[in-house]
Image (cartoon, rainbow, N blue to C red):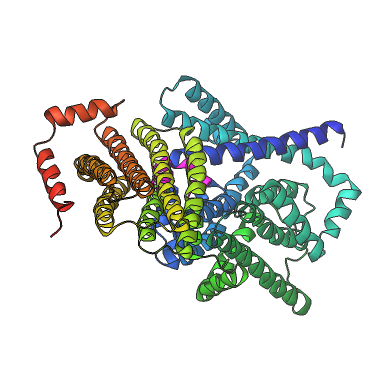
Amino acid sequence: MDIFNIVGMAGGLALFLYGMTVLSSGLEKASGGLMEKVLARMSSNVFSGILFGALVTAAVQSSSATTVIVVGLVNAGLLKLKGAVGIIMGANIGTTVTTQILRLANLEGDSGGGLLLELCKPSNFSAVLAVAGIIIIMTAKRNKVKTAGEIMIGIGILFTGMLLMQEKIAPLADLPQFKSLFAALKNPILGVLVGTVFTAVIQSSAASIGILQALSETGLISFAAAFPIIMGTNIGTCATPLLSSIGASKNAKRAAMIHFYFNLIGTIVFLIVVYILQYTVGLPFWDSVFDTGSIANFHTIFNVTVTILFLPFYTVLEKLAVATVRDAGRGEEEDVAFSKEDILDERLLVTPNVAIAQSTEAVVQMGIYAQKNFNSVRTLFDKYDLKVVDKINERERLLDRLEDRVGSYLIKLNDCDLNENENRTVTTLFHLISEFERIGDYTVNIMETAELMYEKEVKFTEQAMFELNVVSDAIEEIISLAIKAASTGDTGCAYSVEPLEEVVDRLVEELKSVHIDRAKNGVCSIEMSVNFLDILTNAERISDHCSNIAIYLIAENVHYDNLKKHEYLDRLHKNGPADYEEKIERYAAKFSLEQN
């Protein structure tokens, strides 16, 4: 055993881990986000959850990766906590596929059966795959074809690293220190600790088992030494999901805890049963040498057995997680805001269409906050209530926070590999967050006017209140149309915004003129007139921003690259839809200043 063996082992380990990373990345790209969609839809019962959890994990070669995806889906509200239990249980079965594949490295040797069998030797097969993969990557023009090359290179590097580790590890069999090390690892506590820590560091139980399989080539690893290490890898694989749940919603944290409890309890139960059997009746294979295939088989048996044992009690895992991660006890509005921030999960960026849908939902929530604030602020002129003011200020803070969060998320989403339609939608969402935020700001301006009038004990006349209510009714409806258009993408709603905005402009213009005449005639005080005109100005600007929202949505849906507002309005007035004038007349009749 010399320095070159040590360097060779380190190099083999590096290639092995890198091969797993390349392979997992390639498989993730090849899925095109299909895994997330399948997991979100196929979790209606625990059995389908286990099946698809196992299949997805076999595809991405990592139970940690599957559980992180599950945490992301739960965090985004696309997957219920109860549905996550079966998927997490299935992930532990799926991860055993990797170790079964790696046992093929043990087929290396003299095949002596002609060209075909020689080609099937792992060293030759991995080299052929790597060469074919790099040729595909260098010559292919389509990303999907390049991804296939990436998968092939990942497999080639994985086996090359495994074989190099086996070759360089072999001399360790002659070292007495190495024999002493594995004798010490027969201690269950030490073995579990080593397996846990090592797996937590490299973030893959499959990789840890693969390294253990490579070490088994020394012929020094017995079942007594391998058993606690394998148990520890199952606990160590919980580290990645637990870390990924930091800062996520309470249900996302609970999903990570379900994974932890499943592996921890399963490991403890298995340890107790096996050691009781060994120290009572004795296990004939306790001191037998464990080779690559034996390790793969035991790893599979353990995970399948634990899953079967937990099947009747899977709801207990959910209850344990809920008991561990309790509700935060926030107010209703704040809890909604946190939930809308939670759905903007960076784990979903690998699936742009899902991430865009989540972003749209968060943007719509901004509109809902702005609408609720306007509905609340109009009541302050009839009866000023400090509790209502506090609620408006709270919603405005939440709206501003959502604007920052959605904006940051859209920037990251914009850096993803988006198609033309997705890119157009992201651009539209960037515009919408600004428009809804400005609606919120103008609503706060109206609230400040109400506050000023309350402090100076100024009240509007009955006629002025009637006029403000007519305008406010129109503003409430135009905000609702803008929100519905943003939420559903309904161009019919979007096309209805501009006729109503035209009516609001006419109402404001007429009321400004009428109120100025009342001020001149001494019917209203100058101070009340200033406040009245200020409210009208802010209301008109709110309707303008609703109009902007509609225009951005229309531009996206009819594929205008650059739809200017003034050009659009000119087009409407000169050659608009046949029902454009009809809608104006209908809205004008609905929001008339003539009292019945």
In magenta stretch: residue 355: yes
Which residue ends up furthest to the bottom in the rendered image? Answer: 280
| Magenta stretch, residue numbers | 343-360
In magenta stretch: residue 138: no
Residue 477 location (% of width, % of height): 26, 52
Residue at the spot 74% in from the left edge and 58% down from the top edge: 229
> Where, quadrant-wise, is the C terminus in this rendering?
bottom left
Q: From the viewer's perspective, is 516 left or right of 48? A: left
Is residue 198 or residue 355 the one in the foreground?
355
- Above or below residue 8? Residue 539 is below
Residue at the spot 35% in from the left edge and 30% down from the top edge: 420
Residue 54 location (% of width, % of height): 50, 56
Residue 440 location (% of width, % of height): 42, 47
Do we see residue 558 in this rendering?
yes
Is residue 400 or residue 171 the one in the foreground?
400
Which residue ends up furthest to the right in the rendered image? Answer: 176
Q: Quadrant of residue 577?
A: top left
Residue 378 location (% of width, % of height): 35, 57
